[in-house]
Image: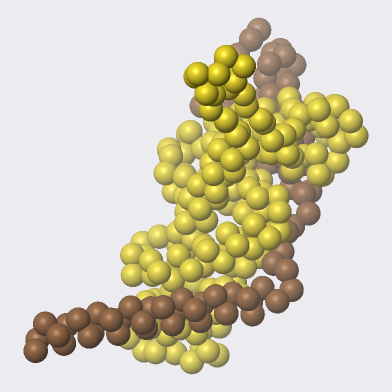
Chain colours: A yellow, B brown
Amino acid sequence: MKVSTTANLHKMSDEDVMEQLQAGVVQAFDIIVSRYKDRLHNFLFRYTHNHEDCEDLVQETFLRVYRSRHSYERIAKLSTWMYTIALNLAKSMYKKKQRMSLISIHADDSDPDDREFEITDTTILQDDALHIKLSVQELEKAMLELNEDFREAIVLRDIQQLTYEEIAEITGTAMGTVKSRINRGRQQLQEIIGDYVKSETF
Amino acid sequence: MNVKHTENEILTDFILDYSDHLLTPAEERSLRDLMAMCDGTRKFAISGRATASLLRKLPEIRAKEGFEQRMAAAFALELEDETRQANIKNCNNKELIN
């Protein structure tokens, strides 16, 4: 395989750049970072709602791309493969956050006054603010209340503007399921944000 | 009239394309006829289009300034670690040979 200079790398397709990375051209990594950094931030922010966490996840995604470079095969688009890695990371981070939001303190069976209680951290899932003035920020928050499957389909379609085929590949689901999730997710989102959507004109 | 819009594949496609403004004028007329007859479909289609359009107005989040430098630093550590691991492996192999 022909090894390229940085100038040549800039002109290559994503898949060719990845092939260079597989061949040991480390400069190819910088090209992938510069092409995907904004797309991945825009995607992963919908899971973190925090710039620092988002940047950590984006960095981790790129590092995993590098570590798993030899498992990438050209039959898939590089973007689809990268989104799959990013989505898996986002999902595991989200689950961890959900677990942390529910702190369960175990009771001491020998003490009759000691009973189990739960502290729910409401910063992750809020719904009272939905009845107040709704804005983009509220829409972002509403998305956190969506069922996980619906949210990933909606983020990939409406924010990342990927095709149904790409979403099906990234999420490992049938295209019919993807379409149905997008429809139902939009419906559920509308139910959460209610009047704000109704006020839009068509 | 009430159509089970969540289980009907053709209608799902129609509503998605309506939400994304991808229907042909004839298709849109057909869907509007159905919307006039079926409350559920009308509600589903209108909220789908409104929500999709709202979501597309969300501001784009971009990498913060200096991200590429921070990424390069993390990548340099990764390469260092990779080299260290490779060296350990080489040493072990040599020991096995000797």
Q: Nearer the viewer, residue A69 or A154?
A: A69
Q: Is residue B17 above or below residue A29?
A: above
Quadrant position of the N terminus of chain A in the picture = bottom left
Q: Is residue A86 above or below residue A91?
A: below
Horizontally, residue B7 falls left or right of residue B98, namely right
Horizontally, residue B96 falls left or right of residue A154, namely left
Q: Residue at x 46, y 76 (%)?
A: B78
Q: Residue at x 44, y 71 (%)?
A: A66
In the rendered image, which quarter is residue B46 located in?
A: top right
Residue A89, horizontal then vertical, whole percent? 51, 53
Horizontally, residue A88 falls left or right of residue B84, namely right
Of all residues, the one furthest to the left in this rendering is B98
Residue A53, horizontal then vertical, whole percent? 64, 57
Residue B36, horizontal then vertical, whole percent? 75, 16
Residue A99 visible to the viewer? yes
Q: Residue at x 60, y 62 (%)?
A: A56
Quadrant position of the C terminus of chain A in the picture = top right
Q: Nearer the viewer, residue A47 or B3?
A: A47
